[in-house]
Image (cartoon, grey):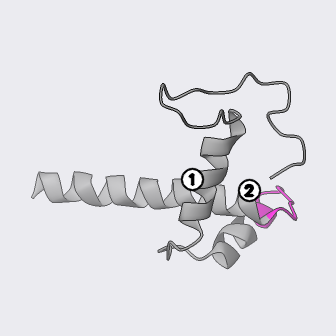
Amino acid sequence: MAEGYGRDTPPIYSGTNEEPRSAGQPLSDFLLQLEDYTPTVPDAISAHYLHTAGFNTTDPRIVSTVRREEQIKILRRKEKIAATR
């Protein structure tokens, strides 16, 4: 993640004796969990279509985010088709 992210954000307390965390920490934890996920749509395909649409990025996190959104749309479409049968 970007250096200093969440620097001006007040710490988050969970009500226990844990150390305070910045608002960016849960997002960082979530992104680390997603690194082990095997996608249906590979990042290379997502990057290709982003580039074709004129969205050029060198940040792999953006491509992964778009890929995850594509995955959600595919799953919802499958559920909708299955519900009509």
Label 2 crowd (10 A; few <14 / some 14-19 / many >=20): some
The answer to whether residue 14 is left or right of residue 56 is: left
Q: Which quarter of the rendering shows the C terminus?
A: bottom left
Residue in view at x 60 percent, y 69 percent: 35
Q: How many dots with numbers?
A: 2
Q: Image height check: is 51 above or below 69?
A: below
Where is residue 64? Give x, y as percent.
Answer: 65, 63
Q: Which mark is residue 62?
A: 2
Give the x, y percent position of residue 34. Answer: 55, 64
Q: Which residue is mark 1?
A: 30
Residue 57 screen position, x and y as percent: 86, 60
Residue in the picture at 73% in, 69% down: 47
Please state if 8 lies on the left or on the right of 53 as rendered: right
10 Å crowding of disc 1: few (<14), some (14-19), many (20+): few
- Using residue 20 as the reference point, say whether residue 81 is left or right of it: left
Q: Secondary structure at mark 1?
A: helix
In the rendered structure, which segment of residues is drawn in magenta?
Answer: 50-59
Per the picture, the main secondary structure of the magenta-coloured stretch is loop
The front one of 8 and 53 is 8
- Whether residue 33 is in magenta: the answer is no
Q: Which mark is residue 56?
A: none
Locate residue 82 relative to residue 7 in the image: left or right: left
Type of the residue with mark 2: Ile
Which of these two is toward me, 27 or 15?
A: 15
Type of the residue with mark 1 = Phe
